Image: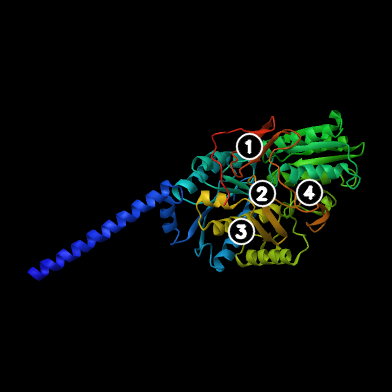
Amino acid sequence: MLEEKSAIQKVQAKKRGYLRGTLLGLVVLLGIGVLGTITVTQVANAAGEEKGPIKIGILHSLSGTMAISEQSIKDIMMMGIEEINAKGGVLGRKIEPIVEDPASNWDLFAEKAKKLLVQDKVPVIFGCWTSVSRKSVLPVVEKNNGLLFYPVQYEGEECSRNVVYTGASVNQQAVPAVEYLMSKEGGEKKKFYLLGTDYVYPRTTNKILRAMLLKKGIAEKDIMEEYTPFHHQDYQTIVAKIKRFCAGGKAAVINTVNGDSNVPLFKELANTGVKAEECPVMSFSVAEDELRGLDAKPLVGHLAAWNYFQSVNTPENKELVKRFKEYAKKNNLPGGDKRVVDDPMFWGYNGLYLWKAAVEKAGSTDVEAVLKSFPGLEIQTAAGKILADKRNHHTAKPVYIGRILANGQFEIIWQSKGLVTPEPWSEYTFPERSCDWGKGGKGSFDMKGGQKVFLDPSAAPIEPM
């Protein structure tokens, strides 16, 4: 009995020693956390990251008016996830996508984003197309300190701490496109019909373009502006007005119509005889994927401005397109090996790889750690390198202008010299405003008396790694 009691006492003493060591370790960790080197939360996150897959959110409309554009982003994202998992995942863990369909319903975007962040606890969401969907998600992501990778061109006038904008800002698409049309190479256009869907992106983009055109000497009477609702189908009256507007020559249409409304718009343009030689349409939301649903022959010669075309002539890009066609066929996706790769798909896909690079640089999926590792990050894509801006959460990228061919592809007729630096606030509407999340930066600011006056001085700066 004495031997048994002694053995029990030894075990109990051992447990007490273990407990003291554990408590001492916790105290040390807490002490270090106070010093700002590490926090208990980070320790818990690091421990949690050792096991199981990394869940990520995919938030794109797979039904409704925007499905024509967004479904394909989801498709190529799934291919990218499969590729990454086949090579060992991220930080040695597989990626597990949680796909949500907001069904082109802007309120539902916010609900689905909250579900992904709060219930599914994803460290990142890849999603949205329209600016109204992004604006719906924005307060949810900011309140819950989530992270959204947004893959589509947009109107600027925003620079959220919790969003990485892999699509173009206005100076990386709309402005160079209109400058091209005004140049000798682009036909020296002097009249512009601004046609868009009635929501944030077209209205704000056209506000900037109007200010730009007026500053460059275009008369007010030579700028027309008109908007239609989402899913609008009857363009007969509008196209008749466009034809009259273009009759005098030196005119162009700037098209910011989104979603499936582009199908009846271009059909009516073809039926009415609005030809590219006389009045080119420059589109900012029509790419190879939308052209799959159209008879492209009557559209030959019309233009689009993007930061990627499938026709970018590199071996790596040809391989990417080939892989996606094979993936679509293997997975019985609609269109099979006839599928194409377009700009929003390209930036959605590369946004995934940009996030992967940031996570691996940070050694963590933690939002704060990823944001710190993002500035200045560079990755190689199938069409060349892209660079994460050191000040804002945008990316430097090339700009291309393409002419529609009969096969639904684009012939690249102009491209920028190197990468174009992103400017979320336009020089034409906010000449003194910019954005800085670099060292000590607190987002958007105005220059006053040579000093940065931040719009939200209470914002927490992100100190780069």
Residue at point 66%, 49% (across, down)? 389
Q: Secondary structure at mark 1?
A: strand
Residue 109 screen position, x and y as percent:
55, 43
Residue 353: numbered disc: 3
- Residue bearing the label numbered 1: 444
Can you tell which of label 4 and label 1 is closer to the viewer? 1
Disc 3 crowd, CA 10 A, few/some/many (<14, 14-19, 20+): many
Given contact means CB atoms under 8 Å apart, are the residues at marks 1 and 3 in contact?
no
State the separation of the CA atoms marked 2 and 4. 25 Å
Residue at point 10%, 70% (across, down)? 3
Residue 211: numbered disc: none
Given contact means CB atoms under 8 Å apart, are the residues at marks 4 and 3 in contact?
no
- Residue bearing the label numbered 4: 304
Q: Nearer the viewer, residue 54 or 324?
A: 54
Q: Secondary structure at mark 4?
A: strand
Disc 3 residue type (three-letter): Tyr
On screen, 201 above or below 344? above
Disc 2 residue type (three-letter): Asp
Residue 209 screen position, x and y as percent:
78, 36
Whichever of labels 2 and 4 marks the residue nearer the N terminus, that label is 4
Whichever of labels 2 and 3 marks the residue nearer the N terminus, that label is 3
On screen, 61 above or below 249? below
Disc 4 residue type (three-letter): Ala
Q: Secondary structure at mark 2?
A: loop
State the separation of the CA atoms marked 4 and 3. 26 Å
Can you tell which of label 2 and label 3 is closer to the viewer? 2
Given contact means CB atoms under 8 Å apart, are the residues at marks 4 and 1 in contact?
no
